[in-house]
Amino acid sequence: GAGVSQSPSNKVTEKGKDVELRCDPISGHTALYWYRQSLGQGLEFLIYFQGNSAPDKSGLPSDRFSAERTGGSVSTLTIQRTQQEDSAVYLCASSPRGGTGELFFGEGSRLTVL
Amino acid sequence: AQKITQTQPGMFVQEKEAVTLDCTYDTSDPSYGLFWYKQPSSGEMIFLIYQGSYDQQNATEGRYSLNFQKARKSANLVISASQLGDSAMYFCAMRDNFGNEKLTFGTGTRLTIIP
């Protein structure tokens, strides 16, 4: 499809395991964001990629969280040694260069840490 | 640094009435954009409306309008003739057009339309 694609849509894991969440942005979009949303809460900014610039990692909650974006396209968010408080929906969004900067969101990856 | 404030965690409004959702922002950049998104219980994020800082007129999109008061740094969303389907979380967001252009979201307002 033409939208932002995230996988897996649902992930259940045990405490202490590592997880990888994938985001495939809209083709040609230079900006890519990761947000975290706990149940009933707002969007917590995690990390922002813009073209070839150094990513803005100011929102990553701990060094267990990391993200990369390969070839300016697909991004992977990795959470090491997961904790129960990591349980949330992880939303990815992309945006084209120029224009209004409107974000196009994926449907999210729901992570449950047991 | 950018900051977006939504002071209403929840609102209840009678169906068919108009509703205003508050949003104030703080930035030192002269050029920026303001956005509103809707998130129904299904979880998807739906873009509603955009206002540029240099736009002379308030943005409108169907039943949505943005009451932009630049001097007061407010960008309230107005929904006219509310419908049951308007029940959702609403997020205000801002993007500075200088610097790293990151979009920053407010904490959201949960709107419930009462039949």
Image (cartoon, coloured by chain):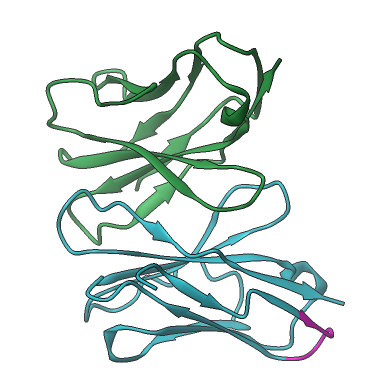
Chain colours: A cyan, B green
- Residue sitting at x 80%, y 88%: A16
Dominant secondary structure, magenta: loop
Question: In the image, is residue A15 part of the stretch drawn in magenta?
Answer: yes
Identified at 63% across, 74% down, the residue is: A9
Q: Position of residue B6 (x, y in %)?
A: 52, 31
Residue at 45% x, 20% y: name it: B79
Residue placed furthest toward the front:
A1
Residue A105 is left or right of residue A19, and the answer is left
- Residue B99 percent across, percent down from the top left: 21, 58
Q: In the drawing, does residue B107 fall left or right of residue B14?
A: left
Q: Does the magenta stretch include residue A82?
A: no
Specify start and end residues of the magenta stretch as a single range: A12-17
- Vertical comparison of B104 with A84: above or below: above
Residue B28 in sight: no
Rendered image quadrant of residue B56? top left
User: Considering the image in quadrants, where does the N terminus of chain A appear?
Assistant: bottom left
Can residue B65 be seen?
yes
Q: Is residue A102 left or right of residue A100?
A: right
Residue at point 73% right, 88% down? Answer: A81
